[in-house]
C-alpha cells in the first residue's frame, strides 16, 4: 500500500518555475496535462534537473519550456529539433527533450522532423497535437481534421491530415507512440520508455484547444473534448481482440514503433575519435 | 448422439474482449454440423468499458425463440468468475451445469461503495461455496492451464473442453469446429487445450481447481486501508476550466461563484488523485496518508 502511494506521489512544484505561475495557457488547455506527464516521467526516472535540457519552438507548445525549472531553450519557429541536434551532439551527457506543436513540428519544421528521425540521434520529441495554430489566432494546421472550421478555413477544411506517427516511423524514428491527455498514466509510462530509449523517440500527444478550436467547431468544453478524444481512439490493449477489430479506422494509441537502430551520436563520436587517433599516429 | 427433443440452452457470458462470441460461434457451428437448428443471440460491443458480454445459444430439431428465459439454461459457461455469478439465476435449478473460469476481472459495478475503507462487494463466497450450490459445476483455472500450455489465448478452448463433457457430441466434431475459428498456426495448441479441459472436467461432477480454491475471500478486504486525504486547491492558479469538477468520479468538487474549483463534499473524496492529475494548471495537490487503526495491529 505504501509503495502504491509513493508511486502516485509527485509534487510538480519541484519541477516548475513557481514565479512564472500561473502559466499563460488558456483554461482547459491540454498542454498542461502533457507537461505534468512528461515531468512525472522525469521524476520517476530520477533524472537530475541539471542534466535535463528542454528545447521548444514557437506556439502555445513553445511556451512550455519557460515553465520548467531546468536548462531550457526557447528557439525559432519550427527549428527546435535543429537546435536540439546541435545540443545533443555537443553534450551527450544531457537528456534532451524537444517540445513542439503540430504546426511547429509538421509544417514549418517538417523538414527538420524527418531528418531528425532519419539520423536517430538520442533525444525525445514531444509533439502536442491540438489540430490548430492557437497562438496566432486559429489557422488551419497539417493535422486539422476534415470539415473543421478555422480562421483560414471559414467554410470547413478540405485538406487531408498528416499522420505524424506514420511519418516519423517511415522517416526512421526508432521509438514512436501516441496517447491522449486523458490517459495520463499511460502517457507518463510512454514518456518513461521514450526517455530511456537510445535513439530518436517521437511521442505525439493528442491535446485539446478548447478556447479556439473547440469553440469554433462546437466541440464542447475541455472535459467533453478530452473524453471524446479518448473514445475515438483505438487503444493498444484492444488492438488484437478476438472479436472484430476495435474501431478499425480510428487512430491508434500506445507504443507504435520500437526498434533498435544505430544511434547517430555514437556513430559520429566513434568516427571523430578514429580520425583523431589516425592523426595522432602520423 | 441421442435425440434432443426440446431445445438445449447454453448461455455464454464474459467480459468484453475475452472471446465470448468466438466460443459461441464454435458451439453454433458444431450444432449445425450435427444437423440441428441453431439460434444464437448476443449483446456485445462493451469491450471499451470492460462491460459484460453474453451470448445465448439454443439448438434442437426446431428452435423458435432466440433467447433463454431465466432458470432455463442447461449449461452456463462463464469466461470470468463474477460474470458467471451474475448470470447464475439463468441456470436450470436441479439439472444445470455451471462452468466458470476463476479469472477475475473486477468490473466497476463490483465496488458499489468507493468510499474510504469500504469493502469491495466482489463475490464474497469462495468458489467451493458456489460450486456446492449448483447441480454440477466446475471452477476451472483455464487461464493458468492455457498459459502452461504456452498460449494464454487458448483459455477459451480449455473451457470448451470442459463444456464438451456436458453436451453429447463426438470429440472430432468439436475439434473440427474449433479449428474453423482459431488461427491456423494455433490449431495444435488449441487441440491440446481442448483435451486438457475435457480430461479435467471428466473426473467428477463438481470440481474446483486447486489454484482457485479459497481464492476470492481474501480479496474482499482489498480496500480496507483507511486513507486520510487532504485536497489543496491553489486558487490563484485555477482558471475554472471545469475539468476537475467533471472528472472527479465522486463528484465532490464544484465551481464557486468566482469560477474557482472548491471541494464541496470532502467526505466523499476517496483520494483517487484524478483531479490532481488532470488539472492542466497544476492547481490541485492531493496528500494521502494511510491511517493504521492502532487497535487492529498486533504489537511488535
Ligand atoms: S482525489 Fe480529487 S478526483 Fe479523487 S475523489 Fe478526491 S476530489 Fe475527487
Ligand atoms: S482542473 Fe484545475 S484549473 Fe480546471 S477548474 Fe479544476 S482546479 Fe481549476
Image (cartoon, coloured by chain):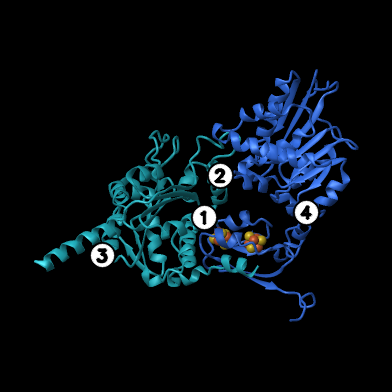
Cβ of mark 3 under 8 Å from ligand 2: the answer is no
In the picture, the disc for residue A28 is 1
Residue B157 visible in the displayed image: no
Q: Nearer the viewer, mark 4 or mark 1?
A: 4
Q: Nearer the viewer, mark 2 or mark 3?
A: 3
Q: Which chain letter goes with mark 3?
A: A
Q: Earlier in the sequence, mark 1 or mark 3?
A: 1
Give residue B153's position: percent from left, percent from top.
61, 41
Q: Residues at badges 2 and 3 in contact (C-beta under 8 Å)?
A: no
Q: Nearer the viewer, mark 1 or mark 3?
A: 3
Mark 1 falls on what kind of element? loop
Task: Say yes or no: labels 2 and 3 on the same chain.
Answer: yes
Mark 4 to mark 3 CA distance (whole Å)? 61 Å
Mark 2 to mark 3 CA distance (whole Å)? 43 Å
Q: Which chain letter goes with mark 1?
A: A
Q: Nearer the viewer, mark 1 or mark 2?
A: 2
Q: Residues at badges 4 and 2 in contact (C-beta under 8 Å)?
A: no
Foreground of the two, B82 or A14: B82
Q: Residue at x 54, y 57 (%)?
A: A185
Amino acid at each position: 500500500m505504501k509503495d502504491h502511494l509513493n508511486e502516485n506521489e509527485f509534487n510538480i512544484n519541484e519541477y516548475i518555475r513557481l514565479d512564472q505561475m500561473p502559466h499563460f495557457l488558456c483554461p482547459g488547455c491540454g498542454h498542461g496535462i502533457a507537461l505534468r506527464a512528461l515531468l512525472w516521467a522525469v521524476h520517476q526516472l530520477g533524472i537530475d534537473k541539471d542534466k535535463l535540457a528542454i528545447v521548444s519552438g514557437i506556439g502555445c507548445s513553445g511556451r512550455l519550456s519557460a515553465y520548467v525549472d531546468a536548462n531550457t531553450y526557447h528557439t525559432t519557429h519550427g527549428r527546435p529539433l535543429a537546435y536540439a541536434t546541435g545540443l545533443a551532439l555537443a553534450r551527450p551527457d544531457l537528456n534532451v527533450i524537444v517540445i513542439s506543436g503540430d504546426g511547429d513540428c509538421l509544417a514549418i519544421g517538417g523538414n527538420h522532423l524527418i531528418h531528425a528521425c532519419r539520423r536517430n540521434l538520442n533525444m525525445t520529441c514531444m509533439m502536442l497535437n491540438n489540430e490548430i495554430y492557437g497562438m496566432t489566432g486559429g489557422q488551419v494546421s497539417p493535422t486539422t481534421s476534415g470539415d473543421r472550421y478555422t480562421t483560414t478555413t471559414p467554410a470547413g477544411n478540405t485538406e487531408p491530415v498528416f499522420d505524424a506517427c506514420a511519418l516519423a516511423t517511415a522517416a526512421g524514428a526508432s521509438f514512436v507512440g501516441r496517447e491522449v491527455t486523458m490517459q495520463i498514466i499511460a502517457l507518463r509510462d510512454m514518456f518513461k520508455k521514450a526517455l530511456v530509449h537510445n535513439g530518436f523517440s517521437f511521442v505525439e500527444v493528442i491535446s485539446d484547444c478548447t478556447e479556439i478550436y473547440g469553440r469554433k467547431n462546437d466541440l464542447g468544453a475541455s472535459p467533453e473534448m478530452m473524453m471524446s478524444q479518448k473514445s475515438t481512439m483505438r487503444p493498444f490493449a484492444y488492438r488484437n481482440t478476438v472479436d472484430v477489430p476495435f474501431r478499425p479506422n480510428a487512430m491508434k494509441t500506445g507504443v507504435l514503433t520500437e526498434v533498435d537502430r544505430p544511434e547517430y551520436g555514437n556513430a559520429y563520436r566513434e568516427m571523430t575519435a578514429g580520425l583523431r587517433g589516425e592523426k595522432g599516429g602520423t | 448422439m441421442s435425440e434432443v427433443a426440446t431445445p438445449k440452452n447454453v448461455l455464454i457470458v464474459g467480459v468484453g474482449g475475452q472471446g465470448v462470441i468466438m466460443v459461441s460461434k464454435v458451439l453454433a457451428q458444431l450444432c449445425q454440423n450435427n444437423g440441428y437448428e441453431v439460434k444464437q443471440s448476443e449483446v456485445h460491443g462493451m469491450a471499451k468499458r470492460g462491460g459484460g458480454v453474453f451470448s445465448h445459444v439454443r439448438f434442437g430439431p426446431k428452435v423458435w425463440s432466440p433467447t433463454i428465459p431465466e432458470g432455463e439454461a442447461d449449461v452456463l459457461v462463464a469466461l470470468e468468475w463474477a460474470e458467471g455469478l451474475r448470470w447464475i439465476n439463468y441456470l436450470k435449478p436441479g439439472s444445470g451445469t455451471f462452468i466458470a473460469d476463476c479469472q477475475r476481472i473486477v468490473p466497476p459495478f463490483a465496488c458499489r461503495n468507493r468510499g474510504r475503507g469500504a469493502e469491495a462487494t466482489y463475490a464474497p463466497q469462495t468458489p467451493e461455496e458456489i460450486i456446492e450450490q449448483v447441480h454440477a459445476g466446475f471452477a476451472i483455472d483455464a487461464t493458468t492451464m492455457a498459459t502452461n500450455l504456452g498460449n494464454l489465448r487458448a483459455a477459451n478452448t480449455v473451457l470448451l473442453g470442459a463444456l464438451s463433457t456436458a453436451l453429447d457430441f463426438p470429440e472430432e466434431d468439436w475439434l473440427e469446429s474449433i479449428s474453423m475459428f482459431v488461427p491456423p498456426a494455433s490449431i495444435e495448441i488449441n487441440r491440446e487445450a481442448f483435451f486438457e479441459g475435457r480430461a479435467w472436467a471428466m473426473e467428477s461432477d463438481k470440481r474446483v481447481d486447486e489454484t482457485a480454491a479459497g481464492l476470492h475471500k481474501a480479496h474482499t478486504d482489498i480496500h480496507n486501508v483507511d486513507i486520510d486525504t487532504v485536497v489543496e486547491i491553489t486558487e490563484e492558479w485555477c482558471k475554472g476550466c471545469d475539468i476537475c469538477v467533471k472528472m472527479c468520479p465522486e463528484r465532490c468538487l464544484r465551481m464557486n461563484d468566482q469560477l474557482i474549483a472548491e471541494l464541496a463534499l470532502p467526505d466523499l473524496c476517496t483520494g483517487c488523485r484524478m483531479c490532481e492529475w488532470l488539472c492542466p494548471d497544476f492547481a490541485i495537490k492531493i496528500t494521502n496518508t494511510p491511517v493504521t487503526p492502532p487497535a487492529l495491529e498486533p504489537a511488535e
